[in-house]
Amino acid sequence: EYKSKVVCEGERLRLGCKTGMQIAVYSAMFGRTQQGTLECPPHHRRAQSV
C-alpha cells in the first residue's frame, strides 16, 4: 500500500503503522515539485522597514 502526504512549513506529520508493518520514505523535498509547482501556499511576509 502506497500513500502520499504533503506537509507545509510549520505543520507536523505523524507517521504510524500496524504491528509487523514497515514505513519506507521514498522521497522528501523542500520547495517546489519537480514540475515546478508549489504544494503549499506561500507565506505572507511583512515588508521590513528602512
Image (cartoon, rainbow, N blue to C red):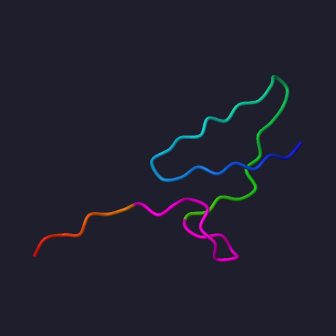
Q: Which residues are magenta?
A: 31-43
- Frontmost residue, 11 versus 19: 11
Instruction: Name the residue furthest left.
Output: 50
Q: Is residue 22 left or right of residue 40?
A: right
The residue sitting at the right extreme is 1
Magenta segment's dominant SS is loop
The picture quadrant where one finds residue 14 is top right
Query: Residue at the location (84% across, 31% down)?
Result: 21
Instruction: Report the side of 50 relative to 4 (left or right).
Output: left
Nearer to me, 18 or 7: 7
Residue at left 81%, top 22%? 19
Q: Quadrant of the N terminus?
A: top right
Residue 28 in the image: state x and y as whole percent: 65, 58
Quadrant of residue 37 within the rendered picture: bottom right
Residue 22: in magenta span: no
Q: Is residue 47 left or right of residue 24?
A: left
Residue 2 placed where, x, y %?
85, 46
Q: Is residue 22 left or right of residue 42?
A: right
- In this picture, is 34 found above or below 17? below
Count numbered badges in the picture: 0
Residue occupying the point 59% across, 40% down: 13
From the top left corner, tell me how far across and down residue 50 is, in percent.
Answer: 10, 76
Say which of 4 and 15 sits in front.
4
Q: Nearer the viewer, residue 25 or 31?
A: 31
